Amino acid sequence: MTHNIYLAGGCFWGLEHFFKQMQGVVDTEVGYANGNVENPTYQDVCTDETGFAETVRVCYDPTVIGLDTLLTMYFLAIDPLSVNKQGEDEGTQYRTGIYYCDSTDLPLIEQKMDEVAERYNGPLAVEVQPLRNFYPAEDYHQDYLEKNPTGYCHVPVALFEMARRFRSGE
């Protein structure tokens, strides 16, 4: 049985590629989460008026990789203090967020937020909310960095290698 967690961390291209490397992640999909219109397009989301965050749906097998590990890896890939900005991308659609489908995940998410907050001198800018809605992004956004290996990405390339090593158990 698989589970889903929805993670927003700036441009979704790199975040999706990062999670795809990990053993136990069985599927990913980029899209738009927790906004206020139906079926938004990328152009709609970029107006900063729809309330959506660029988000990656991470479908995982909890017998292989746990939510705790996924969240640990997530926090390596983002700047948790940055408001509406990751890398060179700015705007509300680039905010950070953890959106859950299963309320039983909330205590673990809150525990991880507390652990991460202890390492910083300011409040975390990562919103934690139940998933209200999610609309898949256009096809050209799906698996973008696999289709465009030299494409833009704010996630450090070293993290992709770390995720690959994690996948192989090294």
Image (cartoon, rainbow, N blue to C red):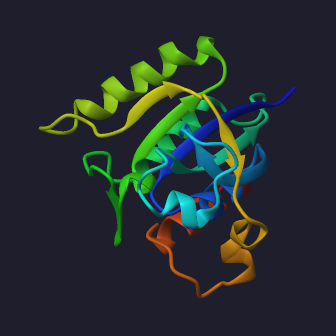
Tell whether 151 sits left or right of 72.
right
Q: Quadrant of residue 111?
A: top left
The quarter in which the N terminus is drawn is: top right
Q: Can you give x and y, in whole percent of width and height, for residue 48 in the image?
A: 41, 56
Tell me where residue 84 appears, x and y as whole percent.
Answer: 32, 53
Q: Count the marks: how many?
A: 0
Quadrant of the image containing the C terminus: bottom right
- Residue 124 at what x, y percent from top left? 27, 37
143 shown above or below 130: below
| Residue closer to the observer: 146 or 99 | 99
In the rendered image, the vertical position of residue 29 relative to residue 128, given as above or below: below
Point 74% across, 29% down: residue: 62
**Which residue is situated farthest in the right direction here?**
1
Residue at 41% over, 20% down: 110
Q: Residue at x 44, y 28 (%)?
A: 128
In the picture, measured across the screen, residue 77 lies left or right of residue 6, that is left
Q: Looking at the image, is 52 positioned above or below residue 46?
A: above
Q: Position of residue 129 (x, y in %)?
A: 48, 26
- Identify the residue at horizontal 50%, vertical 35% (top origin): 98
Relative placement, left or right, of 23 versus 14 is right
Residue placed furthest toward the bottom: 150
Query: Quadrant location of residue 132?
Result: top right
62 with respect to 94 (left or right): right
